[in-house]
Image: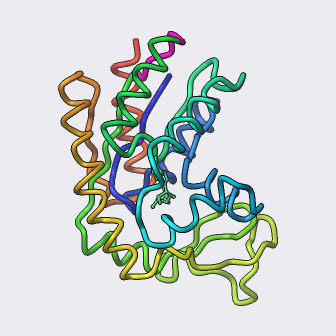
Amino acid sequence: MRLIMLGAPGTGKGTQGKILSAYYGIPNISTGDILRSAIEKGTELGQQAEQYMDKGELVPDGLMIGLIEERLLDDDCKNGFILDGFPRTVKQAIALDRHCQQNKNCVDFVIGLELDENKIVKRLTSRRVCRTCGKDYNLVTNPPPSDNKCVVCGGEIVQRADDTEATVRNRLKVYHEKTKPLQEYYQKKGKLKIFNSDGKIDEIQREIRVFLDEVKN
Ligand code: AMP
């Protein structure tokens, strides 16, 4: 099973991707998580990416394509993978197609997630995450404990630098300009299935799995 999670920030790509990843036993590869970890560690990649991420801009294609091509050659991708946050531009999608054709591991399906923009802004500005393990919290629906320590690993719970309202609005603008065209790109290949992500996490997960069970054989 090789999947792409496609959608605007805040539509639940990471949440749904991680559950699918555990269910199918394949890695969920989040380019955002890889970049945040690089920033945290102070690597060269992190230093290059930080200036773009803080403004809600995309990190240059060249950097992202190299990073994902390398990651997809890892052993744990042999039986499949879930891409969360890649591709984000048509150039990245074309590079991914080329790489996958060469390595005979082409993407099977693209799971598109859609949600009303006002709800996205509300979701993202109230999102909090564990600095250490990345677990998600939400001030409204799933508030962090009063000591602000992650229930999974005890790490500090923080707001992502790019989850402030102004940056979220820019990320949405960038999504519409650069990433939304990928819906048409994958539609033409007959690989796209769109789900409404305004609902309970479990229910959306169930709908995705019903679809995948139907089409995968
Ligand atoms: P995410 O965690 O997926 O919301 O990504 C956070 C930020 O990382 C984005 O706003 C971009 O700045 C950067 N990023 C993640 N994936 C990509 C990508 N495929 N291409 C360019 N920038 C990316």
Residue lying at 58% horizontally and 41% vertically, measured from the top left: 29
Q: Is residue 217 left or right of residue 137?
A: left
Residue lying at 30% horizontally and 38% vertically, measured from the top left: 90
Q: Quadrant of residue 177?
A: bottom left
Residue lying at 24% horizontally and 48% vertically, measured from the top left: 180
Give the farthest residue toward the right. Answer: 154
Q: Quadrant of residue 48?
A: bottom right
Instruction: Give the camera-side residue of 115 and 140.
Output: 115
Give the farthest residue toward the bottom. Answer: 146
Tell me, yes or no, whether the highlighted magenta stretch contains residue 31: no
Q: Is residue 198 above or below residue 183?
A: below
Report how many numbered discs are placed on residues in the image. Answer: 0
At which x and y percent is residue 72? 60, 27
* Quarter occupied by the C terminus: top left
- The secondary structure that dominates the magenta segment is loop
At which x and y percent is residue 109? 36, 27
Residue lying at 27% horizontally and 53% vertically, measured from the top left: 114
Instruction: Give the camera-side residue of 18 and 41.
Output: 41
Instruction: Give the camera-side residue of 45 and 107.
Output: 45
Q: Is residue 61 above or below residue 80?
A: below
At which x and y percent is residue 170? 33, 71
At which x and y percent is residue 139? 52, 82
The stretch of residues the image draws in magenta is 103-107
Q: Is residue 148 above or below residue 71?
A: below
How are the colours assigned in the image?
A: rainbow
